[in-house]
Amino acid sequence: MSYIPHTAAETRQMLAEIGVGSIDELFDAVPEAYRFPRLELPPPMSEMEVAAEMLAISEANDHAGDYAIFRGAGAYHHFIPSVVNHILLRGEFYTAYTPYQPEISQGTLQATYEYQSMMCALTGMDAANASHYDGATSLAEAVTVALEVTRHKRRKIILSHAIHPQYREVVRTYHQGRDIRIIGDRGRGDVIELVEMLDENTAMLAIQYPNFFGQIDNIAVLADAVHEVGALLVIVANPMALSLFRSPGELGADIVVGEGQPMGVPLSYGGPYLGYFAIRQKYVRKIAGRIIGETLDADGKRAFVMTLRPREQDIKRERATSNICTNQGLMALSASVYMALMGKNGLRRVGELNYHKAHYAADRIDRLDGYAVNTGKTFFNEFVLSCPRPVAETNRALLEEGIIGGYDLGQNYFHLEDHMLVCVTETNSKDEIDRLVEVLGGLG
Amino acid sequence: MDGLQPLIYDIGAPGRVGVNLPEPDVPEAELPTELLRDDLPLPEVGELQVVRHFVKLSHLNYSIDKGFYPLGSCTMKYNPKLNEDAARLPGFAQLHPLIEETGAQGALYLMYELQRWLGEISGFEAVSLTPAAGAQGEFAGILMIRNYHLDQGEGQRDIILVPNSAHGTNPATVTMAGMRVRELPSNDQGNVDLDSLRAACQGELRDQIAGMMITVPSTLGLFESTIHDVIDIVHEAGGLMYMDGANMNALMAVVKPGELDFDVMHYNLHKTFSTPHGGGGPGSGAVGVNAKLKDYLPGPIVDIIEEEDESGAPLYGYVMPGKSIGRIKAFQGNFGMHLRAYAYIRVYGDTGIRDVTRYAVLNANYLRAKLMQTYKLPYPRYCGHEFVLEGHFDEVEEVHALDISKRLMDYGFHPPTNYFPLIVPEALLIEPTETEVKEDLDAFVEAMESIAEEARTDPELLLNAPHSAPVRRLDEVRAVKELILCCAAAVPAAGD
């Protein structure tokens, strides 16, 4: 019976103890007409049959194990050291529940506290939570925090159009029941245009760093303008880029959110990932999600515990600002192990590898006839490439040569038809890049 | 101040790196110095140091792999190792979420089948796998109800009824969706009080009722024999019925919520369908609906785009339902959890899935029958997959449910859920799940009996418990007062 260990003899003993003749009698309270329906499911399978089927299904996908991949757009193929997966596979971590009983959960609690610490280090903030579902939902939660901080007296939310299109969709989904106005995200404006939208009714302004097009916008002046009207500056940042570039904290952000996947989490077709959420500590009581804090036990020993609990849904119920219950605990652990392994020097080197390889690729492709790289702004590991043919057609041709090409920007931006967002990471060898250049050249 | 294990920031040495990285194989580009950061305050630790650090931390955790975890409402069943291996297959782990649909036919097929199976198990017409957790499934469900009423020209319907025994996520969800909560009392059987429900649905608020959220079986682990009446009363008032599917482990192939006339429910793949809890997540909270709400599902959902022909398999692809509430997370949901749930259902199949529920309910009733001899059982009837006890004793008033829970740690068990549901004083909510053997259930009963004895003879043992856990009880007030949320070494020097 698969994962059910009962012998017939044990079942009989247990039924006798309960005082019933059969298990089915225990369901008497279920309305009879509806009790025990037949289910149209496939028949049971043994472990080895399921393993074989899973392998077959997995191979019916074009994945980065078989192809050279140049696609990012919010999910990145980075090198993950073996240690990460070995720690993740420890049953002590992945088969544990939320650490509501801190005496027997110090492993999860300390690892999460260290995760919070390392996210603070990357973002330049002084507080972080234990994570949200993903980058998009972290941004949606940041909106709630901005509305709370400005006491629900302000109704305007400014989002840059250069924030990931799906993140902007999620913000709209989350806040459709609220009386607020979301602007900026359907334009094509640059940072200056966003600043012009600021007024006394603005609760927050959010930009992405690097933006969805891989570029580092000039945002040095942004914080002052936002703070002048009493709004919050929210920066959506790729943590990998923060290995090199000035931290959002340094740039004056009040909240920093983003997708933690680049920190040791595999692509996994879009999830599970983790949404990190860092904030200035003065606002920390307004945020949703689990937070781990340091304290002492009865013997004066340092230990960790979930703190500021009265904010959460199980205590505050209808007065909670979010219904979030879980965090992405195991993914936060991945990020923790990854950042610890890379450390101060390793992460910087990975960042540099990304930068050098992306610039090498951009430089070579830009020389091809018919292609043009947008080099107007500094970029990290992604750049916008104008192609001589439709992106879908280009990508079909690349696929035949064993290459997964860039993201088709025309899907989300009308003015960027025939433009591809190319991503190059440390995993792309020079040979792969040269091959990409060669195949693109042949199509030109 | 010493802890059990030094912090990652307190080990290591300047210049140490825990990973062996390659030299650049391309010419180096010039870095934009003026845009770069000066300092990156991360630890500097060697590879073996990192391994030992996290292995030592792991030893401080209790887990299903280590022992019995009767945490009510959380369904801490065995997480099959097979599923972990499957999730790490390169074709899944290294699949980019924005790959063309033609390049993800394996993944799309799997999601399509899982949608279908979940729909079949719950009796719903359509399922979206996008919600990242149960709470997100709830949020999606309540938004669907809201938008349905808006489209009917009944936007004034903004009250969601919630029993006082509900999970905290239920009322929090309602607020998040911009709607209002009205709490309903329970009767002495732990069921929704029908008179109060009628009063709410038939009184002056009648045309403001948007719907009701209810957990089946109830959060007390009981099947409500009046569930039909509850559903009818709400429907008659024009409201829709939301089922919180957290307790689906008590229902599989026993009853289909869709056939009971529920309109929408969420599933917790990390409870019922064995995907690991991961120390707090990831969850996965698919949502199922009937025909009425089908067009409102969060998207994208998977469908057949081109039917199968002589040349081979059908083509699967994404569709956004016509009146969708929208996208609730980036990409397509927690796919890594979808594939584990798929493998889990595949193992049991049509003839086996009912056994999951049957043996979960058998184990719970066995514990109930044994423990009611020592502990107060507020609702003395057959239970579903879990049951609630009162964790206190008349003759030793100073001992509380929390003390019993902490003492259980000394016996090598994870405590039950404490103080939930809120309607039972000193609640201990116990859910054994179907994967536990009788020997372990018996050992748990013995521990509970011996703790009850200790409470009478030596209550200090309980009040100061745990004695053998890695740490003793924590000063939670200090944690809030001091508010130390990250290592000092991680934060840039003071002054913005």
Image (cartoon, helix red, strand yellow):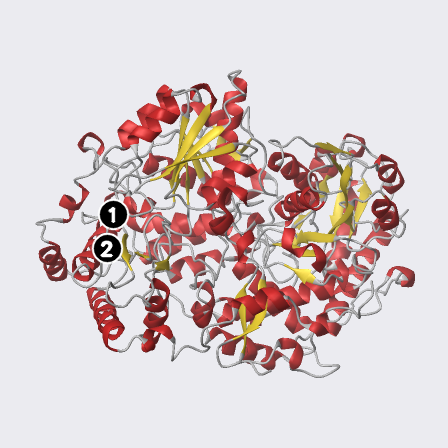
Front in this rendered view, residue B167 or B267: B167
Q: Is residue B291 above or below residue A30?
A: above
Q: Is residue A192 left or right of residue A420?
A: right
Q: For mark 1, what is the residue?
A: B384
Q: Secondary structure at mark 1?
A: loop
Q: Position of residue A109 (x, y in %)?
A: 53, 68
Q: Position of residue B288 (x, y in %)?
A: 42, 35
Front in this rendered view, residue B243 or B43: B243
Front in this rendered view, residue B224 or B289: B224
Report whether mark 2 lies on the same chain as mark 1. Answer: yes
Q: Identify the residue shown where x is 42% and y is 54%.
A: B275
Q: Is residue B435 left or right of residue A128?
A: left
Residue A147 got which mark?
Answer: none
The image quadrant of residue B119 is top left
Mark closest to the chain's N terminus, 2 or 1:
2
Amino acid of disc 1:
Gly
Q: Are marks 2 and 1 in contact (CB under 8 Å)?
A: yes
**Is residue B129 visible to the viewer in this orientation of the structure?**
no
Q: Position of residue B63 (x, y in %)?
A: 40, 67
Query: What is the chain identity of the residue bearing mark 2?
Result: B
Q: Position of residue A332 (x, y in %)?
A: 58, 61
Query: What is the chain identity of the residue bearing mark 1?
Result: B
Location of the N terminus of chain A by quadrant is bottom left
Q: Secondary structure at mark 2?
A: helix
Q: Is residue B10 above or below residue A149?
A: below
Q: Is residue A151 above or below residue B34?
A: above
Q: How many marks?
A: 2
Residue B364 got which mark?
Answer: 2
What separation in Å lies between label 2 and label 1 (alpha carbons)?
A: 7 Å
Q: Identify the residue shown where x is 72% and y is 74%.
A: B489
* Crowd class of label 2 (few under 14; some 14 to 19; many from 20; radius 10 Å): many
